[in-house]
Amino acid sequence: MVVARLPQYARVLSQLLEERVEVVNSDQLGERLQITPAQIRKDLSYFGRFGKQGRGYSVRRLLDELNQILGLDRSWNVAVVGVGRLGRAVLSYPGFAPAGFKIVAAFDTSAALVGQQVGNLTVQPMEELDQTVSQHSISIAIVAVPSSQTQQVIDRLVACGVKAIVNYAPTTPLVRKGIRIENIDPVLALQSMTYYLAQDRLWSN
Amino acid sequence: MVVARLPQYARVLSQLLEERVEVVNSDQLGERLQITPAQIRKDLSYFGRFGKQGRGYSVRRLLDELNQILGLDRSWNVAVVGVGRLGRAVLSYPGFAPAGFKIVAAFDTSAALVGQQVGNLTVQPMEELDQTVSQHSISIAIVAVPSSQTQQVIDRLVACGVKAIVNYAPTTPLVRKGIRIENIDPVLALQSMTYYLAQDRLWSN
């Protein structure tokens, strides 16, 4: 899916901009991204004509256009639900703010955690979800709760008007049409690599 | 890519097995996975004939076959490099062992962390990487070091014989052909969702 690759293009273009590279062609982008130049040209042509045949792309112009397409020309307010070990790692992750994702609220179902200070935020009870989501115009949530609670928490978020969810639990929650969900799961990442390792094993034995 | 979806099939089949479901058809799998039944039939046919027309798939047989294809019918030794906040969250994540991924060693470049006890492991210096990787037949590593160190650490791992890497740093490291790498980055996940949110905004304004 091309949309999943666009953020990677934007990231590499940002790196190029920092390196003061002004023009880049699909071969160079391809090498950095390990994607074929043909695929890159196809992906970018899908969103309009950015480059001129044989001349390459203007790094800054392409980056600006991609950021606009991806909705990255603005900032987004984000809520984190679940402040266990993983939720705390998420809250302290320094990569969100520079990318325009502002974590403005943290929630937990456990009464023992509610009221605790985590970084700049005070952990709120789930009862305050509705009000906080509408007050801060939160359209994105990061969910780091145990699998058994995930579906229920996600249903609550969707009911409050959250439109996009990153889920860290090793489950595949159901959401209605129009709601975006991305599941982040290191086990799935490992499992899709062992396929290749197992094939190597077959050939080398 | 079909291989990336197979672990998700295996996960849902495991859940079905726990629920004592014996036979499943592509419609039911599709609903659980939010993938079209046609895509599921296509994916599974690519790896051989598992089901009979109109009868559905035997849950146990399909799961066994998928596990074998994915190399999940055995266990894998894994090393973690980087034991900062994220690395510690990885080391304490309870999902790896039941899935057959045994974290057998932890490394860090910082002398302050070497020798510390994290769970059952003692943090080792990078100098011991070579010996430990070959001693424990480690073919998979999880890298949770800062972006600035990522490429260097991954080069070291590959030189020691590690074949598959999960990278948590927000960079796109280069690896030679034959080495598998999966980048886990919540920012990229967020960024591919804001595209849709931004489109919604265009339509609703």
Image: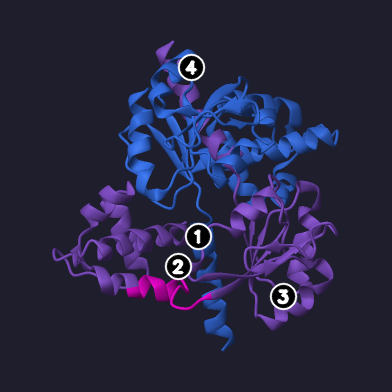
Chain colours: A purple, B blue
Mark 3 to mark 4: distance in Å?
A: 49 Å
- Quadrant in the picture for residue A143: bottom right
For disc 4, the marked residue is B137
Q: Chain of mark 1?
A: A
How many neighbours does mark 2 have within 10 angstroms: few (below 14), some (14-19), or many (20 or more)? Answer: few
Give percent across and percent down for residue B32.
72, 49
Q: Which mark is residue A161?
A: 3
Tell me: B78 left or right of B159.
right
Q: Is residue A77 magenta?
A: no
Q: Secondary structure at mark 1?
A: loop
Give percent across and percent down for residue A123.
74, 65
Asked if badge 4 and badge 1 are on a common chain, one would say no
* Amino acid, disc 3: Gly
* Amino acid, disc 1: Pro
Marks 1,2: beta carbons within 8 A: yes
Marks 4,1: beta carbons within 8 A: no
Say which of A45 and B121 sits in front: B121
Quadrant location, the C terminus of chain A: top left
For disc 1, the marked residue is A94
For disc 2, the marked residue is A98
* Amino acid, disc 4: Ser
Q: Earlier in the sequence, mark 3 or mark 1?
A: 1
How many neighbours does mark 1 have within 10 angstroms: few (below 14), some (14-19), or many (20 or more)? Answer: few
Tell me: B126 left or right of A165.
left
Marks 3,1: beta carbons within 8 A: no
